[in-house]
Image: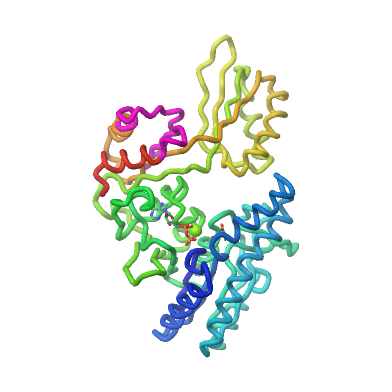
């Protein structure tokens, strides 16, 4: 029998009625002759609720305890789904990360999966059971509970699919696939039938939260095809798979936005060798992921350095910056969390010039100021004022005929 791995996100298990609907889908897949392993997220909104409770007590909650807290969200949903399936007469067992043995590194709240022990999973599958696994969580070698970063159940699912040797991992969510832009903002966005790993990775890492980017990395590394589908209908979704060629024969695959970034500018930095190394190693020591970096040209032997960090790291980054400013003898620093990063992604860009300038023209025509720019072979990103996000995404989507 073939092992089918399915993942259901928060909206798909938002309440008891939805959990019963998911149970029916799992039963259908089982009756179709598959061995089923299901990865489940916490009930929609539950993770936010738990984080907010912690933050009511402490703005920077202890990360180990935060993981202890938020990992409970998935423990609730897996048990409810297993209860629903057992009630329907299907032998089912739910397992948390300790029970499966999903190992991660020790970076609390953004841990990376290092190893998955498949013995327990195979043992349960052999008994004919449906296995339900808690997404988003792992354990360290010292049995500490970790979580994989927001949206991490996608990564749990693909990593488990890879470990079990499943060919396909179905990701069920509230949209029926990956679109050329977030369909919540651009209703005329078009569903992509297929997209290759490389483009999906750029889309996910630049804000298309339909998949956590680590899940795409796992899929690419282990050759797992991801099928993004809706748990609300039977539509064919989007396949994410290997493909050298531009799978839809278009220049641009999509436009994304990320409001989850903040900008930091260090002002009056001495223009000397080793200063940038010092600044960014001090941030790296605190496990803060820096994305875009821009250094202004030197004037009177000083310059400014701007960079972006995830908003959730801003408190920690601000604290760290105080030390950095002193250490490198900069003048001061400023933070701005009212920014957004808009990105245009497409493998076709490799062989076409002029995409960047067209994007800048679209933003200019809308009167939107570009604060930072970065490019890769298949992506162009601009930082703009957060309040202009929707306008920018819609205008770019239209200008590049993505609908
Ligand atoms: P889940 O709880 O199932 O993991 P998420 O909320 O994490 O679901 O991800 C699904 C959401 O991703 C959609 O509701 C949609 O608004 C958003 N999204 C952003 N960009 C895209 C895109 N390009 N294609 C599809 N969905 C997108
Ligand atoms: N429940 C976690 C979150 O809200 C993980 C996930 O949904 O994938 O981020
Ligand atoms: Mg998600």
For the magenta stretch, what is the residue range? 362-389
Q: How is the image coloured?
A: rainbow
Residue 21 shown in magenta: no
Residue 392 on image: x %, y %: 36, 37
Q: Is residue 48 above or below residue 29?
A: above
Left or right of 253 in this view: 223 = right
| Total numbered labels | 0
At a point 26% along the width and 49% down the height, the residue shown is 403
At a point 57% along the width and 38% down the height, the residue shown is 309
Query: Which quadrant, please, contains the N terminus?
Result: bottom left
- Of 392 and 40, nearer the camera is 392
Specify the quadrant of the image occupied by residue 2: bottom left
- Of 131 and 160, nearer the camera is 131
List the single residue furthest toward the top.
Answer: 300
Q: Is residue 49 above or below residue 276?
A: below
List the single residue furthest toward the bottom.
Answer: 89
Left or right of 353 in this view: 185 = right
Residue 382 shown in magenta: yes
- Of 393 and 222, nearer the camera is 393
Left or right of 371 in this view: 156 = right
Residue 222 on image: x %, y %: 47, 63
Left or right of 198 in this view: 92 = right
Q: Is residue 194 above or below residue 379?
A: below
At a point 52% along the width and 35% down the height, the residue shown is 338
Residue 100 on image: x %, y %: 63, 73
Specify the quadrant of the image occupied by residue 196: bottom left
Residue 382 on image: x %, y %: 42, 34
């Amino acid at each position: 029998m073939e092992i089918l791995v399915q993942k259901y996100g928060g909206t798909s298990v938002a309440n008891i009625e939805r959990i019963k609907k998911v149970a029916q889908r799992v039963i259908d897949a089982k009756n179709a002759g598959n061995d089923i392993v299901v990865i489940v997220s916490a009930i929609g909104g539950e993770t936010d609720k738990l984080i907010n409770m912690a933050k009511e007590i402490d703005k920077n909650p202890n990360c180990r305890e935060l993981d202890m807290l938020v990992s409970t969200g998935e423990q609730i949903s897996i048990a409810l789904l297993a209860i629903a399936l057992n009630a329907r007469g299907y032998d089912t067992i739910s397992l948390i990360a300790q029970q499966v043995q999903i190992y991660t590194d020790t970076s609390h709240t953004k841990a990376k999966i290092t190893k998955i022990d498949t013995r327990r999973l195979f043992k349960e599958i052999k008994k004919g059971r449906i296995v339900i696994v808690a997404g988003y969580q792992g354990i360290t070698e010292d049995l500490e509970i970790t979580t994989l970063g927001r949206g991490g159940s996608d990564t749990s699912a693909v990593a488990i699919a890879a470990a079990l040797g499943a060919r396909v991992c179905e990701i069920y969510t509230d949209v029926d696939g990956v679109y050329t832009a977030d369909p919540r903002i651009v209703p005329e966005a078009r569903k992509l039938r297929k997209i290759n790993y490389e483009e999906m990775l750029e889309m996910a890492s630049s804000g298309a939260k339909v998949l956590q980017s680590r899940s795409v990395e796992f899929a690419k590394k282990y050759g797992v095809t991801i099928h993004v589908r809706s748990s609300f209908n039977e539509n064919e979704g989007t396949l994410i798979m290997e493909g050298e060629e531009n799978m839809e024969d278009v220049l641009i695959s999509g436009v994304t936005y990320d409001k989850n970034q903040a900008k930091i500018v260090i002002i009056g930095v001495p223009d000397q060798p080793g200063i940038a190394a010092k600044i960014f190693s001090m941030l790296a020591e605190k496990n803060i992921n820096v994305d875009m970096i821009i250094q202004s040209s030197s004037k009177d032997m000083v310059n400014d350095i701007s960079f972006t960090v995830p908003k959730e790291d801003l408190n920690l980054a601000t604290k760290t910056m105080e030390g950095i400013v002193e250490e490198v003898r900069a003048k001061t620093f400023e933070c701005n969390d009212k920014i957004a990063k808009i990105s245009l992604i497409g493998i076709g860009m490799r062989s076409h010039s002029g995409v960047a300038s067209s994007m800048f023209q679209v933003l200019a025509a809308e009167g939107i100021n570009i604060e930072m720019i970065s490019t890769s072979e298949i992506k162009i990103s601009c930082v703009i004022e957060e309040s202009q996000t929707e306008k920018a995404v819609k205008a770019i989507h239209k200008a590049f005929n993505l609908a």
